[in-house]
Amino acid sequence: MQRPKYDASRYERPSVTVDMVILTLRDEVLQVLLVKRKVWPYKNRWALPGGFVRMKESLEQAAIRELYEETHVKDVYLEQLYTFGNPKRDPRTRVITVAYCALVRSEDLRLSADTDVSDVRWFPVPSLPRPAFDHGEILNYAVARLQNKLLYTNIAFQLLPDLFTLTELQNTYAAILGKPVDKRNFRKKILSSGVLEETSSRKQDGRHRPARLYRFVKEKELEGLIFPKKR
């Protein structure tokens, strides 16, 4: 049977990119990785790292490649967020972008600027420069998704070292939520949830008594655990 002919040139072909929302905790503050563009459009403006999807790679492969090029890390938490397709979002041409969110530990990173950017830097999420394109909308979407998943999954552990104190875990929740959590309520619920395993190790924190270190029990999952402190 003869294969029917198909003329792809009959249809417009928009470009496809991936944009990476790379989040970490630094100084107990949720921070996002931004790159400073050195080419048009939005030259000298800060933007989310990302790039065009190559013809022979999947969306996930493109996201993994971009993540590694910017941070030199792999095998970390990576989630596809949403597709952004406003026809006017990119002044160059019709560009549809698929956004991904990566959670990384800051001590694992080695940042580098590629050929299209002049600088790469961490910025606290609460105080960002005005980003290029629609990257502010993408970042807001990613943070809202993370905050929502924090209430019913164990996603916060992706930002912690293998061993951590209860205070470090509580501060991680507070940093992501952008508001304090009640200490007594938090510890009662987290310890009764079965997601933590107490170790024999302790960590010295200033002049205070050494704090017990815990590890995450990977097969356990949180369900409706943490609630923000009432104001």
Image (cartoon, rainbow, N blue to C red):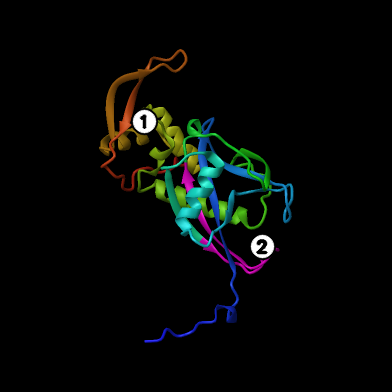
Kindly indicate whether the residue at mark 2 contacts the one at mark 1 (C-beta within 8 angstroms).
no
Pick the front one: 113 or 197? 113
Residue 116 horizontal/vertical position (percent): 67, 48
Which quadrant is home to the N terminus?
A: bottom left
Residue 3 horizontal/vertical position (percent): 42, 83
Indicate whether 76 appears above or below 59: above
**Label 1 Cα neighbours within 10 Å, binned few <14 / some 14-19 / many ≥20:** few
Picture quadrant of residue 110: top right
**Mark number displayed over residue 162:** 1
Q: Residue 86 colored magenta? A: yes
Q: Left or right of 58: which side holds 215?
A: left
Three-letter amino acid code at disc 1?
Asp
Pick the front one: 168 or 118? 118
Q: Residue furthest front?
A: 2
Q: Earlier in the sequence, mark 1 or mark 2?
A: 2
Q: Which residues are magenta?
A: 83-103
Residue 223 horizontal/vertical position (percent): 31, 47
Q: Residue at x 47, y 46 (%)?
A: 102
Three-letter amino acid code at disc 2?
Asp
Q: Residue at x 40, y 31 (%)?
A: 161
Indicate whether 188 appears above or below 226: above
Q: Residue at x 27, y 31 (%)?
A: 197
